[in-house]
Image (spheres, rainbow, N blue to C red):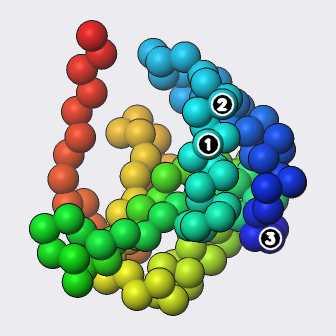
């Protein structure tokens, strides 16, 4: 497990495609769009990679209170049991960025990840998806 570089984009993209298949969303996979986001995280955010996983995140001021910095987990995929290591590394990075809070997310039907995040964070909202 290490910080990702631009050279890791093909590997990260392949892992993200696995993530997409496992989640089974209604929207199609777009490797180019994903790689643009991953490239931005590598160059100006947080990006880590392992043999069978990756983590992408960012930190930014909250729009209505710019002194409050939020770190956002964008993608976490781990098939090699390193999810907790990714989370700890991102938390360290977020603190170094001056973040006041980290926003974690997962699908509502992912009970294992929901239990994990509930041990380190509290729920602050509910998201709903209406596919049109």
Label 2 to label 1: alpha-carbon separation: 6 Å
- As helix, strand or loop, the secondary structure at mark 2 comes to helix
Q: Quadrant of residue 5?
A: bottom right
Q: Which mark is residue 36?
A: 1
Q: Nearer the viewer, mark 3 or mark 2?
A: 2
Q: Examine the rendering and report whether any part of residue 19 can be seen.
A: no
Return the disc, 1 or 3, that comes first in the chain's sequence. Answer: 3
The residue positioned farthest toward the left in the image shown: 64
Work out which quarter of the rendered image holds the C terminus and state it.
top left
- 131 relative position to 90: left or right: left
- As helix, strand or loop, the secondary structure at mark 3 comes to strand
Return the disc, 3 or 2, that comes first in the chain's sequence. Answer: 3
| Residue at image coords 55%, 17% | 28
Q: Which mark is residue 47?
A: none
Work out which quarter of the rendered image holds the N terminus and state it.
bottom right
- Per the image, the residue denoted by label 2 is 32
């Amino acid at each position: 497990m290490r910080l990702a570089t631009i050279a890791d984009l093909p590997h990260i993209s392949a892992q993200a495609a696995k993530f997409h298949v496992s989640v089974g969303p209604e929207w199609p996979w777009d490797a180019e769009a994903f790689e643009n986001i991953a490239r931005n995280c590598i160059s100006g955010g947080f990006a880590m990679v392992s043999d069978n996983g990756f983590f992408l995140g960012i930190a930014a001021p909250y729009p209505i209170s710019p002194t409050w910095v939020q770190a956002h987990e964008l993608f976490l995929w781990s098939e090699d049991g390193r999810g907790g290591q990714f989370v700890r590394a991102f938390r360290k990075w977020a603190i170094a960025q001056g973040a006041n809070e980290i926003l974690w997310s997962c699908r509502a039907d992912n009970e294992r990840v929901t239990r994990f995040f509930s041990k380190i964070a509290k729920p602050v909202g509910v998201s709903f998806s209406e596919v049109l």
